[in-house]
Image (spheres, rainbow, N blue to C red):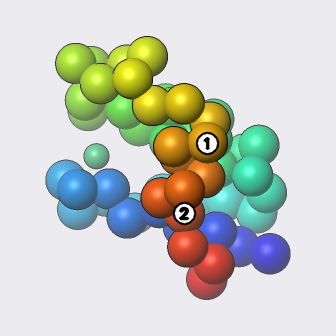
Amino acid sequence: MTKVVNCECGETVRAESDGELVSRVEAHVERDHPDMVGKLSRDDILGMAEEA
Ligand SMILES: [Zn+2]
């Protein structure tokens, strides 16, 4: 099951599992939103996800 997170910056992060999605979103946040690092929990990330 593919899940996507549409970041507010316009980036779309896709993954095939919850765990992969969380790690990809965390990597994106570290790269593009360093001020947000540590502010998004796993549940926050999964709450932003949509099935695709
Ligand atoms: Zn972003």
Q: CA distance from mark 1 to mark 2?
A: 10 Å
Q: In the shown orientation, is residue 15 left or right of residue 14?
A: right
Q: Which mark is residue 35?
A: none
Which amino acid is tagged 2?
Answer: Ala
Residue at 23% x, 56% y is 8
Q: In the shown orientation, is residue 32 left or right of residue 50?
A: left
Q: Position of residue 42 (x, y in %)?
A: 62, 36
Residue at 76% x, 63% y is 16
Q: Which mark is residue 43?
A: 1
Label 1 within 8 A of ligand 1 by Cβ = no
Q: Is residue 30 visible?
A: no
Residue at 75% x, 52% y is 18
Q: Position of residue 9 (x, y in %)?
A: 19, 53
Query: Mark 1–mark 2 contact, CB under 8 Å?
Result: no
Q: Quadrant of the N terminus?
A: bottom right
Please tell me in which quadrant of the rendered image residue 36 appears.
Answer: top left
Of circles 1 and 2, the one toward us is 1
Q: Quadrant of the C terminus?
A: bottom right
